Amino acid sequence: MTASAPELGRREREILRAIVHDYIHSGEPVASQPLLARHALECSPATVRNVMADLEALGFLEKPHASSGRVPTERGYRLYVDALLKVRAPSPADRERIERATQDAPAVDSLLGNAAELLHSLSHYAGVVTTPAPRSDPTRHIEFVRLRENRVLAVFVSQAGIVTNKLVQLDFPMEPAELEGAAGYLNEKLGRLPISGLREAILADMRADQSALHGLIAKALRLAEQTFPPAKAAGEVLVEGEESLLDTPEFADVGKARALLRAFAEKDRILRVLDRVLSGSELQIFIGAESEFAAVPDVSVVAAPYGHGGQVLGALAVIGPTRMNYARVIPLVDLTAREISRVLGGGSDS
């Protein structure tokens, strides 16, 4: 996603970097005199003004008001992120916090559930995590717990060790011993078959076995049909801290704030963005209209995939204003994704 643009000279690049840096930290349009006071640009105020005018003509800067300084455009942010940004490793305190949070998680579901809150807490923007879809992290073990009035709690353990529960109201009675037998039968099948092949395998067993076991197999099939997720089901989207964006000047307007919160409520929209990260298998940055948040201006997404055994399972992200501190957010997202992958067994030590 590198910005297509004329090749900028060293002076133009230094001035653009300085403007984006100052605007990210102040939120105020940047003028030539304050820019020279804060940065060793080694040129005159007139030269800075001329370069700023050139960058505006090229589409990297714009003036919010006729008499104001300049602010970066989406094109300016893209060039900054792709070619001008100097990304450093997370601070020792941030690294320690990420490593402690991932290592101390009691279970994989806790690890993912806490990751969105961790990213929000570290970045002060919205933290987002998608859990693995069943197709990428299939169930390897299931247990049934009988409750009252023909209700059953199905407990799934995925290949990556993620535990999920589903409460099911059965339309037929099952005794605890039958539930245990059905779970054992289904787990034996899950050890050899994907979920997509489960139904045909059970039906074949039913045709071949007309003994007393036939009734148990039939109940196991009905249990599987009521409890297992659809083959095309997507993972969950976990979001923490979306309200924090409302504290930024970009979303002080009530209409923009409502549009932003509606975008977060539409989890399919977030999934479409992060699905692009899954297919790319590397950290990606979407600025403004590049993301599925195009209807909400001034939003950027920094996202990275996590996985297990070389397989991408899900993604995590920080969603914030286009004026976000990319130099800080990018390494936080990258390290969190790598640490989660390491805990799952699919990544190398960082």
Image: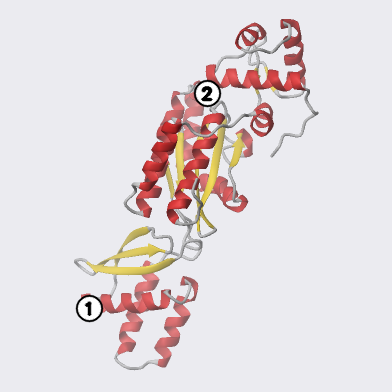
Question: What residue is pinned by disc 1?
Answer: 177
Say how the picture is coloured. secondary structure
Point out the residue furthest to the left here.
148
x, y percentage for residue 252?
A: 48, 22
Q: CA distance from mark 1 to mark 2?
A: 60 Å
At a point 49% along the width and 41% down the height, the residue shown is: 335
Quadrant of the drawing holding the N terminus = top right
Q: Nearer the viewer, residue 200 or 314?
A: 314
At a point 42% along the width and 74% down the height, the residue shown is: 190
Q: Quadrant of residue 34?
A: top right
Point out the residue furthest to the right here.
6
Question: Dot 2: within a 10 Å radius of its alpha carbon, few (fewer than 14), some, or many (20 or more) residues?
Answer: some
Q: Amino acid at mark 1?
A: Ala
At a point 39% along the width and 58% down the height, the residue shown is: 162
Residue 242 visible, this angle: no
- Against 128, is 184 above or below? below
Q: Secondary structure at mark 2?
A: helix
Which of the numbered marks, if any, corresponds to residue 250?
Answer: 2
How many discs appear? Answer: 2
Judge left or right: residue 116 versus residue 150.
Answer: right
Which of the numbered marks, if any, corresponds to residue 17?
Answer: none
Q: Amino acid at mark 2?
A: Glu
x, y percentage for residue 289?
A: 63, 35
Q: Quadrant of residue 8?
A: top right
Q: Quadrant of residue 19?
A: top right
x, y percentage for residue 334?
A: 52, 41
- Against 13, is 193 above or below? below
Judge left or right: residue 291 versus residue 318.
Answer: right
Q: Secondary structure at mark 1?
A: helix
x, y percentage for residue 229?
A: 42, 64
For marks 1 and 2 on the same chain, the one whose residue lies earlier in the sequence: 1
Q: Nearer the viewer, mark 1 or mark 2?
A: 1
